[in-house]
Image (cartoon, rainbow, N blue to C red):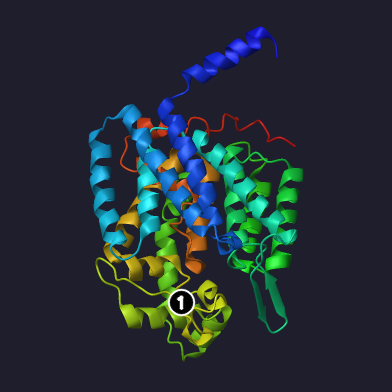
Amino acid sequence: MDVSGILRMRAKLMNLDAGYICFTVGLVLWLACRILLTTTIVDTGVGSLIGSLVKAGLLLCLFSEIFAWKFTFESFCLLLAFGFFSLVTYRVGGLDIVYLLCIAYTSRRYSLDSILIPALIVVVATCAAVVCLSLTEVIPSATSVVGSRVRSSLGFNWVTFLSHYYLEIVILYAVVRKGRLPIWQILLLFAVDFAIYEITDSRNSFLLAAVFLAILFFLRKRGSDEAPDWLRVLLSCSFLIGLLLSAFLYVLPDPSSALGVRLNGLLSRRLIYTQEAIAAYGISPLGTKVTWVTQSLVRTGQYDSSQYLYVDCSYFNIAINYGWLFLAFIITLLTVTTNRSIRTAGLTLGIGLAFFALHGVVDPQLLDLHYCVFLVLLGNAFDPDDVWTDKMKGLKSSVSKSEPYAQ
């Protein structure tokens, strides 16, 4: 690099926002370590250190606020709401919800692409490192054997976790690329998706990633990322639709009826477990402290398999644990966020958010920021349209309707 190139790079570094640097370092540290907490690395005796680094990442994100200590009326209202629900959820063990609300709030001043790109890199790098450590037998893998169904976690605490992260990676990459993926990249992403499925036999996220890639394939020659009004409304309501679909699948059917028996089998006993949890804990306005007995806890010998009780449906998991008031609040924010995302960034992001809404019907990661980095958008939920337009400017497709996507 010549002297002029070095000077230009130095000028760019000097112009970087100190708050953004602090926030990004904190987010990257938090994401990497939070992902590691879902792996068997914690069984090697470094779990407490990783947990401390998670907290350090959060503190860096919070510290970034001092570089732009100012509030609009909208951001102040959101701060009050987030503060209230942080207290509500923390009292019933919702530490991850507190992390989510804090990081989402501190992200509100930065463009979405400047958040998603480093997030994509760290999620890919961390997951790849865990898989490599597992394949070289540096760390163990969890296994599940049910009849002839043998599943491996590839270094994660449970066999489904890697596929959930891969769904996030696929959607993140598509949004960063504004949906403009050439055929070879779509095929490569599907090949990796299929390979993960073959090893982990995790069907839900495999199917969602495959369908998402198929939609990208059919949309790639559309030449526009704009959504028609009817589709924007439908996608905007995807989280509300997910809640209603969850009620239809898990609450309304009688488990002893023919429909209930069929659904319970199809959904791997989720119907029975959901109704047992509702009967045991109820759904209150402000939530209840719940003792979930997960497969990971059964695997480590803390509980017997007969004691297993967990609600995989995100919507009812949230309702039981954190209360219907918080559920109503978060569904409202997600609906507003999705609508504004589609109007200011385009169709790819809207479809991606809809897939996370659908994923929440059968899996419990809906509000886990490390599984869905797009949740940082909640920090801008109350902001005016011009703020949203500015936040999405790096993701807005400039392709005209007559210009095809790259081959």
Hey, what amino acid is under mark 1? Val
Quadrant holding the N terminus: top right
Residue depicted at x 61% and y 49%: 126
Q: Farthest residue to the bottom: give it.
A: 256
Residue depicted at x 34% and y 71%: 320
Residue 132 against residue 389 in the figure, above or below: below
Taking the image as shown, residue 300 lies to the left or right of residue 139, namely left
Residue depicted at x 75% and y 37%: 407
User: Badge 1 is on which residue?
Assistant: 293
Q: Where is residue 236 in the image (x, y as percent from the top left)?
A: 42, 51
Q: Farthest residue to the top: give it.
A: 4
Residue 18 in sight here: yes
Residue 81 against residue 388 in the figure, above or below: below
Q: Identify the element where label 1 is drawn.
A: loop
Residue 282 against residue 2 in the figure, above or below: below
Q: Position of residue 72 (x, y in %)?
A: 25, 33
Q: Nearer the viewer, residue 373 or 244?
A: 373
